Amino acid sequence: MVTMDRLLNVDQVAELLGTTVRFPRRLIEERRITFVKVGRHVRIPESAVLAFVVANTVEPMTLRPAVLRRAA
């Protein structure tokens, strides 16, 4: 059984990511995010936005206290 994701337009994705509309359009153009063509409209599955965020999340580095105390 296939579950249907909510399909978002470019404006909704931009708002969700907190960016301008240009950023999701660039992701689509560079094929860095999954998208669906519905006629002439472009829609992005909500799960694709979440996957993009997870894939591009950078975890903070944990440094040992000794390394932090050294002066350069």
Image: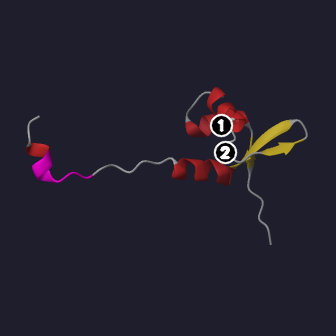
**Image coordinates for residue 24, horizontal then vertical, percent:** 65, 35
What residue lies at 21% left-to-right and 51% top-to-bottom? Answer: 63
Residue farthest right in this picture: 39
Between 71 and 37, the residue placed more toward the observer is 71
Q: Quadrant of the N terminus?
A: bottom right
The answer to if 32 sits in the magenta stretch is: no
As displayed, is residue 14 above or below residue 69? above
Q: Which of marks 1 and 2 is nearer the N terminus?
A: 1
Q: State yes or no: discs 1 and 2 in contact (Cβ < 8 Å).
A: yes
- Residue annotated with mark 2: 33
Q: What stretch is highlighted in magenta?
A: 62-67
Residue placed under numbered mark 1 in the picture: 27
Colour treatment of the image: secondary structure
Amino acid type at mark 2: Ile
Q: Is mark 2 on a helix, strand or loop?
A: loop
* Label 1 neighbour load within 10 Å: few <14, some 14-19, many 20+: some
Q: Where is residue 20 in the image (x, y as percent from the top left)?
A: 61, 27
